[in-house]
Image: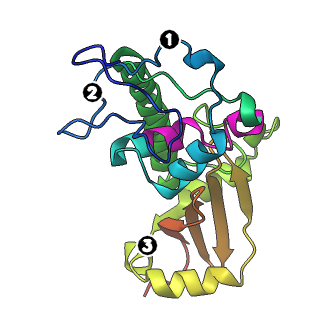
């Protein structure tokens, strides 16, 4: 039944039941509860995952939320098979999930901002990143080189050319975050190109630097 509204039967087969209980504003419409005796019914976990991956049955914003919650780099819930139980649909629970996902998204944003900035040093990534990324012995040479780098927004604008060059280049720095995002630093001649490859496989080039003494014509 719905916590606010008329009683309604629940079919646990996702092929015929809209799990999100979408309201007019495409948000959760109350708490969905199974009828008495539903605990003895089987839940089709495969249908849930296939619907989620295909973006069906759920409202768009709920699909995005669950894809973040069940990020395979951070969650092993898919391995539960037939024992999997979907998350609660109560408004309070959903609100808490959104807050947690929002906090994670903010950390990801700050990481990229620092990574693309001119204070990032590869062997001393800083507190925003896993401690394993940083060397136990700080390199003065690496820090000095980072300070000497000069932003090249003119070259960063040449995205197609950069992507083509990086396809045949090996990264000088390659680290993966807990969420699956890869942080990459390429050195091409006197240039340093920094990019992040998301868990969807798309690579975003966020910064290009040139060495301070290099010709920037």
- Other residues around mark 1 within 10 Å, as few (<14) / some (14–19) / many (≥20): few
Q: Nearer the viewer, mark 3 or mark 2?
A: 2
Indicate whether 148 appears above or below 124.
below
Q: Is residue 37 visible?
A: yes
Q: Residue at 55% of width from left, 67% of height from top?
A: 203
Residue 36, numbered circle = 1
Q: Is residue 61 magenta?
A: no
Residue 152, numbered circle = 3
How far from the left and from the top, in percent, is residue 133?
74, 42
**Residue matched to label 2:** 29
Report the label total.
3
Q: Residue at 50% of width from left, 42% of height from top?
A: 14
Q: CA distance from mark 2 to mark 1?
A: 21 Å
Q: Nearer the viewer, mark 1 or mark 3?
A: 1
Q: Is residue 69 magenta?
A: yes
Front residue of 48/41: it is 41
- Other residues around mark 2 within 10 Å, as few (<14) / some (14–19) / many (≥20): some
Front residue of 112/14: it is 14
Indicate whether 157 appears above or below 71.
below
How far from the left and from the top, in percent, is residue 92?
36, 15
For label 1, the SS is loop
Q: Over which residues does the magenta segment extend?
A: 64-80
Q: Is residue 189 visible?
A: no
How far from the left and from the top, in percent, is residue 163?
55, 81
| N-term mark: 3 or 2 | 2
| N-term mark: 2 or 1 | 2
Front residue of 182/24: it is 24
């Amino acid at each position: 039944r719905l916590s606010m509204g008329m009683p309604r039967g629940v079919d646990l087969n996702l092929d015929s039941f809209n799990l999100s209980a979408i309201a007019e504003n495409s948000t959760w419409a109350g708490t969905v509860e199974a009828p008495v005796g539903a605990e003895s019914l089987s839940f089709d976990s495969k249908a849930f995952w296939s619907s989620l991956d295909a973006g069906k049955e759920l409202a768009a914003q709920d699909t995005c939320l669950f894809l973040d919650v069940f990020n395979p780099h951070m969650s092993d819930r898919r391995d539960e098979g037939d024992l999997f139980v979907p998350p609660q649909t109560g408004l309070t629970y959903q609100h808490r999930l959104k807050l947690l996902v929002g906090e994670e998204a903010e950390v990801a944003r700050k990481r990229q901002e620092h990574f693309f900035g001119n204070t990032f040093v590869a062997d001393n990534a800083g507190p925003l990143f896993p401690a394993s990324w940083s060397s136990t012995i700080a390199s003065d040479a690496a820090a000095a080189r980072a300070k000497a780098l000069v932003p090249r927004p003119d070259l960063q604008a040449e995205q197609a050319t950069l992507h083509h060059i990086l396809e045949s280049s090996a990264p000088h720095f390659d680290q993966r975050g807990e969420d699956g995002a890869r942080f990459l630093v390429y050195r091409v001649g006197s240039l340093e190109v920094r990019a992040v490859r998301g868990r969807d496989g798309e690579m975003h080039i966020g910064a290009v630097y040139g060495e301070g003494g290099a010709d920037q014509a």
